[in-house]
Amino acid sequence: MSNTTKHLPRFSRYASLLLFALSALFAPLKASCATTERKESALELADKAFWNMNYPVADSIYTIEVRRNPGNADLYWKLSRLNVSIGESVDRTKKDERLRYYRKAVEYAKTCITLDSTIAKGHSWYAASLGIMADKTGSNEKLNRAKEVKRALDSALRLNPNDETALSILGSYYREAAKISWFKRVVGNAFIGEMPTGNYDLAKKAFRKAISIDSRIIRNYHELALIELDQNNRDEALKLMKTALNKPVIMPSDRRRLDEMRALLKKYSE
């Protein structure tokens, strides 16, 4: 037997000891790397809760953060967005309760704009909250607020031409304006003031751009499909509604819109 063969068992033992020592050395390093992974910030947790529609958790975190940092303008448009969503989740028969949330949403958006008028989301959520509040209080209020809503949308899109929230609300603005007849517009101009102007082509352009930026939002497919139905473009409307059925529910109003689209699909498929 050669000398090399005699020393193989001893070498094997040394190798095993060396591997054990190295693994013991690097084990704490691996553990420390795991513990240094970045933790989510309070705002990230609040945003995650919002998109999961866990509104009580989102509200509590945003509120705590506002108390800690009242000068953070971004917090206020997020609170505006949250209160619009909470209002939309309240039973539709509880009008006063819903309006209370919409009013809070308007005030939060106004605070955001006061603190920093260069944040597009402040203007877009001011338009959204003001528009939905006016819509719930009646036609006259909607017309009275139309000019203010359009001004806020113009500000948002001037600051960020790709603000999907502003584009979506702008699409609705143009859709509503397109439905006002010539006679009503003349009478409105005489007794109320300047009436909103717009047409279906402008509305469709706004909705399609909003979809190209964020394809998840069910609202845009629904509103666009309704315009296509108004224009007797049934095939395009059905296509949009079928696409919407595969999108995630991320807003309380999404469930209502999906129910309405299922009913329309059934109606036009019979």
Image (cartoon, helix red, strand yellow):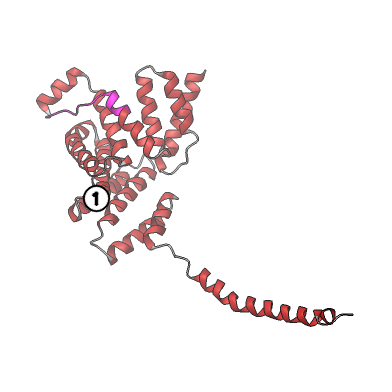
What stretch of residues is rendered in magenta? Answer: 193-204
Q: On screen, 201 above or below 10? A: above
Residue for point 43% across, 39% down: 216
Q: Can see residue 103?
A: no
Tell which residue pokes out farthest to the right in this image.
1
Residue to which mark 1 is pinned: 119
Image coordinates of residue 170 in percent, x first then y, are: 27, 34
**Picture quarter containing residue 70?**
bottom left
Q: On screen, 248 above or below 37? A: above
Label 1: how many residues lie within 10 Å, few (<14), some (14-19) or many (20+)? some
Callout count: 1
Residue for point 39% across, 54% down: 47
Label 1 SS: loop
Q: Going by the image, does 3 lie left or right of 59?
A: right
Quarter of the picture containing the N terminus is bottom right
Q: Amino acid at mark 1?
A: Ile
Image coordinates of residue 161 in percent, x first then y, are: 27, 40
The residue lying toward the viewer, choosing from 77 and 91, is 77
